[in-house]
Image: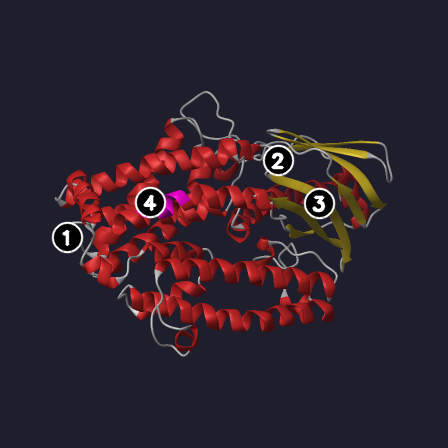
C-alpha cells in the first residue's frame, strides 16, 4: 500500500481493508466534528439524516436567516478537506483494482456513493484478481455453473434471483421495520438493477440496451409480486414505478460498464453478496436514526364572483358535493364529500368528510369573513388501493401521510369578487421526501380544487 502522502498527491493505490478502515474512520470523525460544531457553536442538534435536510425540513436558500447561512457555510468549510481526502482515497482504490478513474463521479452522488463504497470494498486488487486463489477460483466456478450462458437464460436467472431477494427486502422493510425509506425506494431498485445485470453479463459482454431492459425487468416483476401477494395496491406501485425504474436503470448501467473490466467475473460474487447484505443493515440503521419528516405546504386559489360575506358561510361548511368526474378520484384517491361544523368561533370543531373517513379540524382562528384556520386531530386513509383481492391494508395507509393543519383565506377583489385561497400543511414519512412530495402535492392540490370550485360555484349562485 502506498503512503498517505502519495495518495493525497494523487499517486499510488490502497487495498480493500485499508480503504474500508480509512472510509469508516473518516465517516465517524466527520460525524463527530459536525455534531460538536452544531452543539457547541450553533447550539443545535445534528443527526446523520440532517445531511439531506440540515433544518429538518425543505427550505429555500433565500429564506434562511443569517445564523442558518453561517451554519451551512461552516459545514461546507469543514467538509472540504474530507471531500479532498475521500476523492484521493477513492482514486487510489480504483487504481488498485485497475478500474477507470472516471468512476470517482459516484463519490459525489448521494445514496449511490454509499453503495459505491461497498462496491470498492469488495473489488479485488488487480494482481489478486488476475491470479485468483484456488479456493476463490472454486467459488467462481460454482457461480459459473449456476448461471446459464445464454443471454435469455442469464437474464432470467438475474431477474428471478433479484426478485426473490427484493421481495424479502421489501417485506423486511415494510412489515418488520415499518419503514418506507431510502433503503426501500432507492437501495432496493438500484441493487436489483445492478445485481441482475451483473449476472446477465457474467459470461459474455451484452449491449447497453439489453442491460437496461434486464435491469428494469426486476423491479417490474417485484411490483407484480407485491400486488399478487397482497402486500401493495396498484396505485402506490404506479407512483413508485418511475423512481424505481430510473434507479434500477442506473444500477444496470453501472454493471454494464463493469463488464469491460477484465476482473469483473472474479469480483462479482463478493460484490453481489456485500451489496445484498448491506441493504438490510442500512435499512435498520435508517429506521433507528429516525429522520425527522419535513413539513410541506400546498396552496391553491380560485377567484369567486361573489363578495367575501357571501363566500364565508360556504367555507365553514358545505353540503354534499357531486360525485367526482376526475379519473384520479374514481381510481381510489380519497376525495371530499361534505363539511360539517359544530359551534362557532375558535374552539369550534369542523369535520371534513372524505370518501375514506373524516378529518377532525378544531378551529384555531375564526376571523370572519377573512380567515378560517384549523389544526387536524384525525386523518382518514389517503386512498383505497386497487387490488385483485377484496382489500389490502399496507402500513403506509395509516400515519404515513398526515395533514397537520389548514386554512381558508378570503381577500376582497374589485367588483365585489373574492380571492379564495386554501392551504394545507402536511408531512409524510416516505423517502426520498422530495420525490414523494411531487405526488402528495399534486393530490392535495386536486383536492383543494374540488372544494374551492364547488364553493365558488355555490357562492356565485347565491349572490
91 relative position to 82: left or right: left
Vertical placement of 360 versus 298: above or below? above
Q: Position of residue 74 (x, y in %)?
A: 64, 71
Disc 2 target residue = 399
* Residue situated in front as seen by the camera: 132 or 181: 132
At horizontal 29% and vertical 43% (from top left) the residue drawn is 217
| Mark 2 / mark 1, whichever is N-terminal | 1
* Residue situated in front as seen by the camera: 245 or 357: 245
Estimate the spatial distance between the alpha carbons at disc 2 and disc 1, rounded to whole Å.
48 Å
Q: Position of residue 129 (x, y in %)?
A: 22, 58
Estimate the spatial distance between the alpha carbons at disc 3 and disc 1, rounded to whole Å.
70 Å
Vertical placement of 5 versus 219: above or below? below
| Mark 4 / mark 2, whichever is N-terminal | 4
Checking the image for residue 460, the label placed there is 3
Q: How would you rate the neighbour count of disc 1 (Cα within 10 Å): few for under 14, some for 14-19, many for 20 or more?
A: some
Disc 1 target residue = 204
Point out the frontmost of discs 3 and 2: 2
- How many numbered markers are drawn? 4
* Residue situated in front as seen by the camera: 38 or 179: 38
Estimate the spatial distance between the alpha carbons at disc 4 and disc 3, rounded to whole Å.
65 Å
Q: How would you rate the neighbour count of disc 3 (Cα within 10 Å): few for under 14, some for 14-19, many for 20 or more?
A: some
Q: Position of residue 310 (x, y in %)?
A: 79, 44
Report helix, strand or loop for mark 4: helix
273 falls in the magenta region:
yes
Disc 4 target residue = 273
**What's the magenta region?**
272-277
The residue at the far top in this view is: 390
Q: Position of residue 271 (x, y in %)?
A: 31, 50
Q: How would you rate the neighbour count of disc 4 (Cα within 10 Å): few for under 14, some for 14-19, many for 20 or more?
A: few
Amino acid at each position: 500500500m502506498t503512503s498517505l502522502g502519495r495518495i493525497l498527491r494523487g499517486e499510488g493505490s490502497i487495498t480493500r481493508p485499508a480503504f474500508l478502515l480509512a472510509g469508516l474512520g473518516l465517516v465517524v470523525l466527520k460525524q463527530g466534528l459536525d455534531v460538536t460544531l452544531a452543539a457547541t457553536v450553533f447550539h443545535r442538534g445534528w443527526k446523520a439524516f440532517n445531511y439531506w435536510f440540515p433544518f429538518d425540513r425543505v427550505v429555500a436558500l433565500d429564506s434562511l436567516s443569517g445564523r442558518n447561512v453561517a451554519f451551512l457555510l461552516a459545514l461546507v468549510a469543514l467538509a472540504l478537506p474530507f471531500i479532498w481526502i475521500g476523492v484521493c482515497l477513492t482514486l487510489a482504490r480504483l487504481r488498485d483494482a485497475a478500474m477507470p478513474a472516471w468512476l470517482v463521479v459516484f463519490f459525489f452522488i448521494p445514496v449511490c456513493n454509499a453503495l459505491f463504497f461497498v462496491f470498492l470494498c469488495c473489488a479485488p486488487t488487480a494482481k489478486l484478481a488476475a491470479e485468483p486463489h484456488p479456493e476463490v477460483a472454486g467459488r467462481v466456478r460454482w457461480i459459473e455453473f449456476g448461471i446459464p450462458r445464454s443471454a435469455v437464460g442469464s437474464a432470467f436467472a438475474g431477474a428471478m434471483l433479484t426478485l426473490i431477494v427484493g421481495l424479502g427486502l421489501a417485506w423486511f422493510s415494510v412489515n418488520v421495520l415499518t419503514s418506507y425509506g431510502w433503503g426501500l425506494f432507492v437501495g432496493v431498485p438500484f441493487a436489483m438493477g445492478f445485481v441482475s445485470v451483473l449476472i446477465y453479463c457474467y459470461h459474455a459482454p451484452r449491449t447497453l440496451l439489453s442491460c437496461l431492459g434486464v435491469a428494469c425487468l426486476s423491479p417490474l416483476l417485484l411490483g407484480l409480486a407485491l400486488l399478487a401477494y397482497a402486500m401493495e395496491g396498484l396505485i402506490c406501485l404506479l407512483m413508485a414505478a418511475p423512481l424505481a425504474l430510473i434507479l434500477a436503470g442506473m444500477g444496470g448501467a453501472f454493471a454494464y460498464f463493469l463488464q469491460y473490466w477484465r476482473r469483473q467475473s472474479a469480483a462479482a460474487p463478493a460484490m453481489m453478496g456485500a451489496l445484498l447484505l448491506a441493504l438490510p443493515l442500512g435499512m435498520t440503521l435508517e429506521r433507528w436514526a429516525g429522520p425527522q419528516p419535513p413539513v410541506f405546504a400546498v396552496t391553491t386559489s380560485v377567484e369567486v364572483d361573489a363578495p367575501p360575506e357571501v363566500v364565508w358561510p360556504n367555507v365553514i361548511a358545505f353540503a354534499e358535493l357531486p360525485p367526482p368526474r376526475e379519473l384520479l378520484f374514481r381510481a381510489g384517491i380519497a376525495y371530499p364529500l361534505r363539511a360539517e361544523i359544530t359551534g362557532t368561533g375558535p374552539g369550534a370543531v369542523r369535520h371534513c368528510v372524505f370518501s375514506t373517513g373524516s378529518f377532525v379540524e378544531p378551529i384555531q382562528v375564526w376571523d370572519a369573513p377573512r380567515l378560517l384556520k384549523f389544526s387536524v386531530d384525525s386523518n382518514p386513509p389517503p386512498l383505497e388501493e386497487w387490488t385483485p383481492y377484496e382489500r389490502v391494508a399496507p402500513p403506509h395507509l395509516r400515519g404515513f401521510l398526515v395533514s397537520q393543519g389548514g386554512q381558508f383565506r378570503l381577500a376582497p377583489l374589485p367588483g365585489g369578487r373574492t380571492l379564495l385561497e386554501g392551504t394545507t400543511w402536511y408531512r409524510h414519512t416516505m423517502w426520498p421526501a422530495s420525490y414523494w412530495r411531487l405526488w402528495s402535492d399534486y393530490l392535495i392540490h386536486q383536492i383543494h380544487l374540488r372544494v374551492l370550485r364547488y364553493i365558488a360555484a355555490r357562492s356565485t349562485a347565491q349572490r
